[in-house]
Amino acid sequence: MDRIDEVLAQLPQEIVTRDQDIISAYTTDFRRHYTGRTTAVLRPRNTADVQHIVRACAQRHVPLVPQGGNTSYCTAATPSDKGDELVVSLERMNTVRDLDPANLSASADAGIILSDLQQAVSDAGLLLPLALGSQQSCRIGGNVSTNAGGISVLRYGMARDLVLGLEVVLPDGSLYSELSPLRKNNSGYDVKQLFIGAEGTLGIITAVSLKLARKPRQTVTAFLALKDISTLARILDAAQIQTGESITSFEYISDASLRLLLDAKDVLRHPLQEKSQHYVLLEATTVSPVLDLEESITRLFGELFEQGLIMDGTIAASGQQRAELWHLRESIPEAEVHHGGSVKHDIAVRTSQLAAFIVEASRIVERNAPGAIPSIYGHVGDGNVHFNLVPPALSDKVEFKNRLTREISPLIYQLTADMEGTFSAEYGLGRVKMDLLERHGALGKLRVMRILKTALDPKGVMNPGKVVA
Amino acid sequence: MDRIDEVLAQLPQEIVTRDQDIISAYTTDFRRHYTGRTTAVLRPRNTADVQHIVRACAQRHVPLVPQGGNTSYCTAATPSDKGDELVVSLERMNTVRDLDPANLSASADAGIILSDLQQAVSDAGLLLPLALGSQQSCRIGGNVSTNAGGISVLRYGMARDLVLGLEVVLPDGSLYSELSPLRKNNSGYDVKQLFIGAEGTLGIITAVSLKLARKPRQTVTAFLALKDISTLARILDAAQIQTGESITSFEYISDASLRLLLDAKDVLRHPLQEKSQHYVLLEATTVSPVLDLEESITRLFGELFEQGLIMDGTIAASGQQRAELWHLRESIPEAEVHHGGSVKHDIAVRTSQLAAFIVEASRIVERNAPGAIPSIYGHVGDGNVHFNLVPPALSDKVEFKNRLTREISPLIYQLTADMEGTFSAEYGLGRVKMDLLERHGALGKLRVMRILKTALDPKGVMNPGKVVA
């Protein structure tokens, strides 16, 4: 009996799944770039089960891969292809533990699907302000483990900014639990920070406490055609001033991305008469029933026109129109897939340098990979852009993408480093970006990461081969 | 030659101060509760000097005490009375390194005085939204090391929420530097989080990058007399809704604190006609030049009167009146000193339970320490209250306070623990609250803290005897 069988024999059989037909969904990553193997998927029912699993694995040096919704963009949640790791899916742990509207907080098991938690919070009259493309399938533990971003970061911050408390099973099976939803707590090191964004390499998050927000009473969604990309930061600033900092989303969409979209999906239409190279999807929200947000945005439009910063703009006149604008934004990744997929670069630089980054990176692509379509979009209000490269229509798409990865990505990442930006703004490292950390990581950072990993997981059982080795 | 002399002989003599007359300011804590000893104070001129010091000390196992403005409320910045530690003051490292208005960010040496950095930022047309009582003397590295709170946390968060990057000299003298002011960066563990709130026990912060805010164009400051403390959370909620979440400060002041103040300082006057047991100092700010904030607050007053939640209220009609209201709030600690000092409890519970905490804790004091004056005030918008006990007028004050510390503080802390609150919302642990962490700390937290301390500072040279042992 090998070590894995010994572990499995020790566990309650209700939580062990060995059926390879079922298992295959857990071993292939979200983007279908990587397929691993495993003997079994473990599906704990509660925190005690997770402790039981981790203790058994730690004793026998069997590595574990924690998995939420398996939506990592960097294959952080899939096992290696050696078949020597067990997958721990948190999917059965999906209840809301506590909802305190007066404290604007909620606690839930890590395995709850983000949209289910959003719904529970909404039913209580509040807003969980974490919103991302995969919210129908990602799970809150995974969101916290990757410090997820999304479309409301500008207003509400990253997942880290929403976490008030965590419960974590440590690599030796012991428990760290600090779930009390306090706004302020300086009683020692803020231990929970360690596990946020660690992608399951330092422990398994089993429950989270989150900050909630008041539900907006007004939402205004607008779509703008910009004269010039260099005015991005100026437009955001004007919008914040006009609305009293009520901007929740400020998303850039390049003309190339929009054209990929309209080409891929017949049902979508261009929202504006005037065409441009650069568009912004902007949303403002307020809890106030009296401040006139639509008037503020209309005034903003007037100001931007007058200053020659925008060529055209539209304000969604109904919930339907708002949904259409958001559908455009959220369908871009799918449109990229339709055109043969993309080589992605999840970049952040100073917001003050984002326009310059886009211009310079586009030049690099033009010069070195003629024909590549730069599908550029993202959360520019946070200085974050998805600078994705789609192969041209008539190319050998796989071959073209391989060449882009080999030849162009290093140039994009070097430009990012030269501008003191980051090669991973919100996706994390997973298995695929560890080499970038070696090459471009901050001074001394990798060394500290290794010290932390060794100290907390000396046996290396927790999601090995990801983030730090 | 002992080990300390060996270290001192190795260092540039310009940074070594042995004059005991000068040194005494560095060895007594802010509240004058503790006086330590040291052979020398080291005053590095730059990061290289700090590395030089730390390397020399690590080699010879000589412990170090990093010091900013020496304003810790928990003696985190003063050396022990054994005289075996060297003090490293960051005071000479006080330049602004970078100010990027379009990126809403600033970077500065850790030793800059908070109000100097505020001024530099203000001169650039922006706001550094960290504001606290000691801002004329505390230094930004210390603020970050204790994860300082203050009067604007409700709107802008704690120091942690403002930190975009850090430069830190690690306990072996090597450098971790990740100062680039990015809004989003998921390139590996968020290493900087470790040092925020670690009170200098894991390294010496030598520089920080901070988020800035736009300068408010309108400020409305108001003072309210509440009918009942149980409506605190409801009033804050109503204020946020009326103003579109423009509340920056929401500070509770008990009648007892107000009376201590008016008694101690002849120059102060009661801001209201109607007297109450409970007051709130509220400030709303907005960057918008057009939204009428004063109208919103006036409407709020009307609503609160109508619902019978407040008895009286005033809106500052001038900068002078605003300053007077804030002067009241900020003079409370001084008024406590005037009346013989106080035994402080820096408590946070859920905001939804704060009123219940105040009521119950007051009952405990009445029952067990008749005559003690509960001076209760603080940042109730964050669920944080300073529940301080002042000895009665005719008591032996030192003896009375000792008895309170011995007999009442444990009851207050037990109540806090029963309500899943924290015994240190913003002051940290320093040397004086370590036992509380042992008794009331979250499950598994102290264990993880010890693992981190041992891993990063195996020789125990970095601020020993503080936070974690």
Image (cartoon, coloured by chain):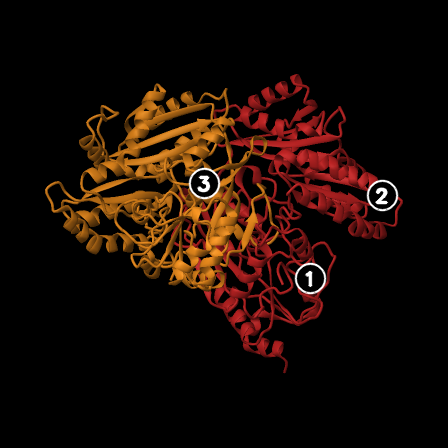
Chain colours: A orange, B red
Indicate the quadrant containing the C terminus of chain B: top left, top right, bottom left or bottom right: bottom right
C-alpha separation, residue under disc 1 versus residue under disc 3: 41 Å
In front: label 2 or label 1: 2
Instruction: Using the image as rendered, state which of residue A84 and residue A225 is in the foreground.
Output: A84
Task: State whether residue B376 appears in this view.
Answer: yes
Residue at 72% x, 24% y: name it. B227
Q: Kindly check if marks 2 and 3 are in contact, taking CB atoms under 8 A apart as contact.
A: no
The residue under label 2 is B392
Q: In which quadrant of the rendered view does residue B88 lie? A: bottom right
Mark 2, secondary structure of its residue? loop
Residue B414 image offset from top left, x and y in percent? 71, 46
Label 3 amino acid? Answer: Gly
A153 lies above or below B397: above
The residue under label 1 is B25
The residue under label 3 is A157
Outermost residue, bottom side = B1
Outermost residue, left side = A394
Q: Kindly check if marks 2 and 1 are in contact, taking CB atoms under 8 A apart as contact.
A: no
Tag 3, which chain? Answer: A
Q: In which quadrant of the rendered view does residue A275 lie? A: top left
B436 displayed left or right of A451: right
